[in-house]
Amino acid sequence: MAGIDVGGCMSAITSAFQGGADLVQSLQERKQQKRKRKESDMEQVYAEKMLHRALVDAAEKTQTECVERRHRHGRAFVQGDSLATAELKDVMIGLQMEVIQPLQLSRASENAVLDTGPLHEAVITYKATVIRSLVHLCYRISVSSARQTQYSSNDFVSPVTSPGLPQRMSLNFGALSLQELPPPRHPDRASYHRPSTSIASTVASDVRGSSSAKTSPETTLSSESDTNADRGTSSGSTCDGSLSAPEVYETEEDMFRANSAPEVVTKEYESMLSQQALRSAALRGPPMKTPKNAHPAYQNHYMEAPITIFEEPDYPWSPLTRPAKHNNYHNFCKGAWLVRQKLEEGLSITMLPNTKGTTTPYWKCKHCAFRSKAPSTNSTTLPDSIYFDARGIRYRWVFLAKSHSFAQTPAEDSHDLYSYCCIFCAAQGTQTTIYKNLKALLEHVVSRHKTYMLTPEVKEKTRCVVGGAPGKDVVWDVNLPETQGRSLKGSVGKFVISAVTGLG
């Protein structure tokens, strides 16, 4: 598995889905050979048909997504990155262990009863995981490509090798490149020619060119080259100052010199820059010098669109859209989102009556019935008990407060009875489902969010600490046991080979 890329992972995943569909089809064909079926078998037959349809759909969907995105992003998509490769490897291994292996065992034994429920759920989940991983990979590729384009847009492209630029032709010498221009006669005047400086008389050179055209027809076609060469070497020839000089355009050589020179923005021109550009000038470097007096032949090449400025998003949970009423707060309670911003915005101390006829302080959500007993009436003291789960997860009550969904009725002193959503899915930019209780949420976290696949950004958003007991100075909400990446060796490797090559 060394050196495997996204393209190889996608080939194995698509083959695994298709191989599972072929296995289910062979099971159906074998059962159809029996003379009669009992009525109790009809539900099993229908479930197997649904599983077969889900496998075929997953194979077609993943193949289509792979082909479209590979055509759009090319080699960068095939190579991928470490995060996408790790996610797809986990899907590959999960498919072999949870789908392909049970189907192969059921096919090997005629009397085996196939439980299609978990298989169907695994197929749908892994298909969604693959598509989400590809979407996030393409997003990272697009951002990286846009930034590379931003920083490389100031690079000069030689006009001789650029197909979009006209070449200056001479009848005898062909294309006249920049290296073939004569050296400047005055080194101290070899700087580029600007519209604001004194202009050499172009009319005089045009008169010389028209008079010499009577004796030498060759100079007619090369007059533009001669004029550009004279202009590049400053005004060394004499000219009549009484003649009105027309406007002189800047050449491509002038543009190159202007773009490569260091730029200093004075106060009189500083107001021309937008405030957004001024804020990000230190990050993106000096902007590209756009000449205002460029020749029309070069305007299409040099007058490019303004550079896109990438600023740090002010919304920390992007690429997930902002929670609002129209998107049902992504299935979370509105108070759960507010608690992540500031504790007092989502929770408050409320005195509620108890069975003894007295009142008890509770930390209560401001937008639903989610609550928990408060240690005291002090609004700065949260329930600080650390809860342990059999799966090795440690969590604080604030983790539940940030994960709860809308609760219509309170649960009597029990956190397990509330419904929750996955904060890790939200941190990864994925729409999360509602889990009916705390046990279902923790099972999802352990099975779907492997710690070796959690990025530092996800850990920071969720205040998650991986492995071991967090130190006293560490601020954390949830502590997950460290998991290692699974490798495709031994029997699992054989499953991958059978999925890629056929039924095996």
Image: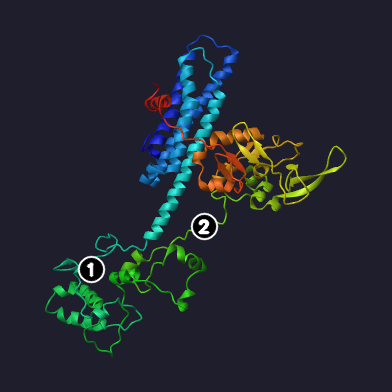
Q: What x and y, as percent, mark residue 331?
A: 64, 42
154 or 453, which lies in front? 453
Callout 2, which amino acid?
A: Glu
Residue found at the very far front of the displayed protein: 472
What residue does disc 1 label? 178
Q: What x and y, as percent, mark residue 332?
A: 65, 44
Q: Is residue 259 above or below residue 378?
A: below
Q: Residue at x 46, y 32 (%)?
A: 486
**Can I make out residue 306 in this image?**
no
In the displayed structure, does residue 19 sit left or right of residue 373?
Answer: left
Q: Is residue 271 above or below residue 8?
A: below
Q: What x and y, as percent, mark residue 56?
A: 47, 29
What's the CA distance linking mark 1 and mark 2?
A: 42 Å
> Which image quarter holds the N terminus?
top left
In the displayed structure, does residue 227 sit left or right of residue 356?
Answer: left
What residue does disc 2 label? 312
Q: Is residue 498 above or below residue 301?
A: above
Secondary structure at badge 2 equals: loop
In the displayed structure, does residue 218 sit left or right of residue 164?
Answer: left
Callout 1, which amino acid?
A: Leu
Q: What x and y, as percent, mark residue 323?
A: 62, 49
Secondary structure at badge 1 equals: helix
